[in-house]
Image (cartoon, rainbow, N blue to C red):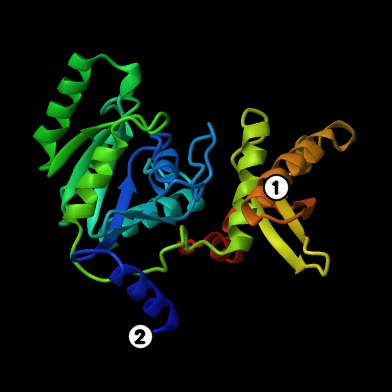
Amino acid sequence: MTQEEDIAADAAAETHGPTHSGFVALIGPTNAGKSTLVNRLVGAKVSIVSHKVQTTRAIVRGIAIHDNAQIVFMDTPGIFKPRRRLDRAMVTSAWGGAKDADLIMLLIDSERGLRGDAEAILEGLKEVQQPKILVLNKIDRVNREDLLALAAAANEKIVFERTFMISAETGSGCDDVMDYLATTLPEGPWYYPEDQISDLPMRQLAAEITREKLFLRLHQELPYSSHVETEKWEERKDGSVRIEQVIYVERDSQKKIALGKGGETIKAISTASRKELSEILEQPVHLFLFVKVRENWGDDPERFREMGLEFPK
């Protein structure tokens, strides 16, 4: 047993009664609210959120403790009809996460219902053996009769163990989901130390935070083809950290958009990212952002490895 497993076992042993642990894969269409829900259930930010579709690109694991259970949520990329190599890698990653989990949580946007990608996902789930629960999100925007009709329609297509109606934004109904998972996941020791909330390396989380600020600032102007990498991380003697990151775009015109007039846009993105990183790290952060043009970076295997994705042939 590794030292990390020892710590996790000791933490679990301090609880009363048998401990439970397991992996729960959140799958669903793009912009269904998966990342918002993971952050809500974990109680901390582990996955970035933006209005731009397909924001989540690789599986992010968020770790929550509820009663005697350690629940490892796998926030997967939204499932949609892929058009490019990156799209195919993301969708493959999402289905792979579902098949590796102990339980699958299908998240549906109640406003959109089963239209489009949701219908295709339900068909795909018929081939997956793991137990499944249905979670209808954004229930505060839909009347009860429509919610009940949506739940009935989904349950006619797939055998779900339970159906939950929640709002990831407000937290309504989320405690019921946690209570169910805590008693349903298999008995066993915890996988991670009690105070760990994610398995994402800090360098990668920092890049994700900056990518979120980039999307929030430029979600209408900047195309989907942008990517952020942390190239340098230096802990300084004064207790601060110096971080250098590169924003990759595919064309010079995109670089001009990311920089903004007189560097105004990149400065705003840097300020927002630095503020959040300082809060997360609880230390001063010196953040330096650079924008580089790398044509067709979406066909570069190294970029896929940086994102935690397998490069599709």
Residue at disc 2, secondary structure: loop
Residue 187's spot in the image, x, y percent? Answer: 18, 66
Disc 1 or disc 2, which is closer to the eye? Answer: 2
Sequence-earlier tag: 1 or 2: 2
Alpha-carbon span between mark 1 and mark 2? 44 Å
Residue 86's spot in the image, x, y percent? Answer: 50, 52
Q: What residue is rendered at 26% in x and 59% in y?
A: 68
Q: What residue is rendered at 77% in x and 38% in y?
A: 253
Q: Which residue is mark 1?
A: 249
Q: Is residue 28 above or below residue 240?
A: above
Q: On the picture, is 95 further left or further right than 262?
A: left
Question: Is residue 92 visible to us here?
Answer: yes
Q: Which residue is mark 2?
A: 1
Residue 33's spot in the image, x, y percent? Answer: 40, 36
Question: Is residue 128 visible to us here?
Answer: no
Decide: few, some or many residues near mark 2? Use Cα within 10 Å; few <14, some 14-19, many ≥20: few
Q: On the picture, is 287 further left or further right than 217?
A: right
Q: What residue is rendered at 9% in x and 33% in y?
A: 156
Amino acid type at image mark 2: Met
